[in-house]
Image (tube, grey):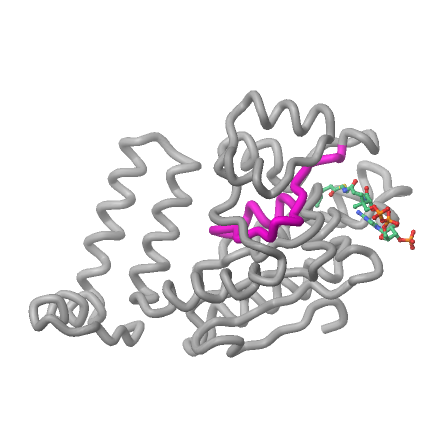
Amino acid sequence: MEYILVREQYEPAVALIQLNRPKELNALNTQLMQELRDTLQQLDKNDSVRVVIITGNEQAFAAGADIKQMSDKSAIDMLVIDQFSTWDQIRRIKKPIIAAVSGFALGGGCELAMMCDMIIASETAKFGQPEIKIGVMPGAGGTQRLTKAIGKAKAMELILTGRFITAEEAQAYGLVNKVVPVEMYLYEAAQLAKEIAQMSPIAAQLAKEAVNRSFETHLDEGLSFERKNFYLTFASEDQKEGMRAFVERRKPDFKGK
Ligand code: HXC
């Protein structure tokens, strides 16, 4: 891996992926995205990992897709390169993913953070979709996910002006889960990850899938999907263990079976 660093057991059952092109503010070139995709797919199959954190560095989570790599491409080049198939594969990762964001999360960087399941931000984080300023528009889900996260009025404003918002604003709009001082954002993300890692990984995956389904379907279909996943949890030993532990007034020990 050239552009990412991976710590498989950053905390017990919690993996950490660090985007690592610091000089380019972690601009997301196709190789970085492929490395990220490959790593996430491996971690998704690794039973010793239950939650993944994606982070950058203090200065930047990611300042967007790599503009230099894209600048002279034609529409047909873009079609053939088909970079979004990598993004689609990342979208299908089953384990919970937390974005730990400090500094710039712009364009594709903001879209990557939004593709994660939760966002913990440092007070210095800045979110935005500035593609309009370079004559394009969001292409990795920004018009959809930002609108769903913060509503039409604010999403239009950010996407049509390219303005950035602070971490505090992002929290007020419902884009991020929590804002903490810069020295705490990774710690805070790890705390959240550790808490989730103690749950049944089967229940967590099925719940993640059902929450995400709410963005893609009507209520009736979403409720029916949720119900089937709920029933499916009863096929796991973790369901027996969880309910037995409640009755026996002890902490459950979920095995992911
Ligand atoms: C390539 C980038 C980059 C990017 C920064 N750099 N962002 N390179 N692609 N998206 C590089 C700069 O060229 C520079 O390298 C180095 O990182 C530091 O950046 P500076 O601009 O010197 O830093 P600063 O003055 O602090 O400004 C920070 C910034 C600015 C506000 C974040 O860099 C910026 O506006 N970046 C572009 C943000 C953007 O437009 N993102 C959307 C991209 S399109 P050199 O070698 O020149 O010194 C997009 C489409 C998504 O994301 C859809 C497909 C996935």
What are the residue bounds of the magenta stretch? 110-131
Residue lying at 29% horizontally and 76% vertically, measured from the top left: 255
Where in the figure is residue 16, as x and y percent of width and height?
57, 69
Asked if residue 10 is among those painted magenta in the image, a careful observer would answer: no
The residue depicted at 41 percent of the width and 44 percent of the height is 212
Q: Quarter of the image holding residue 138?
A: top right
Q: Quadrant of the N terminus?
A: bottom right
Task: Farthest residue to the top: give it.
Answer: 153
Is 188 or 140 nearer to us in this picture?
A: 188
Query: Is residue 8 in view from this perspective?
Result: yes
The percent position of residue 87, horizontal first and vertical second, equals 62, 51
When the figure is inspected, residue 189 is found, relative to residue 83, above or below; the finding is below
Which residue is located at x 29 percent, y 44 percent?
225
Given residues 35 and 152, the one toward you in this image is 152
Q: Is residue 8 above or below residue 126?
A: below
Q: Is residue 116 magenta?
A: yes
